[in-house]
Image (tube, helix red, strand yellow):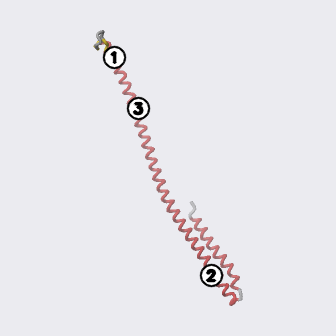
Amino acid sequence: MIVTLDNGQFGLESSKEDLKESLSSLLSDSKSYKSEATLLKKQIENIKNSLSGIAKKISEYNEKITEKRKVLSNHIDTVDKITDDAKSYATRGKIVAEIGVITAAIAAPFTGGTFLVAIPVAEVVVGLSCLAFVAFVKGSFVF
């Protein structure tokens, strides 16, 4: 124990029993702190392991999302191409039907108008075939 003497100087004034009691108390506190530190270290390791597992799952999920995004993008591109092709076929069919109408109108004086009756039928057939193709395309790529 450190005490102040009357003359203002510091000195040791303790017995062996006082010193033993102080050291025993310090040893007990040190052991208690060590066990608490060990427990905290284990808890920190458990938290670290949990966070590591969460990070791994997030990484795996990110990879799945990235892969599905690529597949979806490819699928959208394919459907867009097929839709554009269907529109092109429909436009071509319409042009052919219009050419047929013009031809029928020109040929009407020579055929006695009988070819004009076939025009609406031809337009219906061309229109339905284009619609059927578009319906087929859309039906075959349903999500």
Image vertical order of residue 66 relative to residue 45, above or below: below
Q: Determine which residue is flagged by label 2.
A: 99
Residue 116 occupies quadrant:
bottom right
Specify the label residue 22 is tagged with.
Answer: 1
User: Mark 1 and mark 3: span between their CA atoms?
Assistant: 27 Å
Residue at position x 53%, y 62% in the image: 76
Q: Position of residue 57 (x, y in %)?
A: 45, 47
In space, the residues marked 2 and 1 are separated at their CA atoms by: 113 Å
Pick whichever of labels 2 and 3 is earlier in the sequence.
Answer: 3
In which quadrant of the rendered image does the C terminus lie? bottom right
Q: Which mark is residue 106?
A: none
The residue identified by callout 3 is 40
Residue farthest top in this picture: 6
The kind of secondary structure element at disc 1 is helix
Q: Nearer the viewer, mark 2 or mark 1?
A: 2
Instruction: Characterize the local packing of mark 3: few (<14), some (14-19) or many (20 or more) Cα atoms within 10 angstroms.
Output: few
Residue 74 point in image, percent of width and height: 50, 62
Q: Secondary structure at mark 3?
A: helix
Can the viewer see residue 65 in this picture?
yes
Residue type of the residue flagged with mark 3? Leu
Q: Amino acid at mark 2?
A: Ile
Quadrant assignment, res 23: top left
Judge whether 135 appears above or below 45 on screen.
below
- Tag 2 near tag 1, CB within 8 Å: no
For the point 65% across and 83% down, the residue is 102
* Mark positioned earlier in the residue sequence (2 or 1): 1
Mark 1 or mark 3: name the one nearer the start of the chain. Answer: 1
Q: Quadrant of the N terminus?
A: top left
Crowd rating for badge 2 (residues with CA inside 10 Å; few <14, some 14–19, many 20+): few
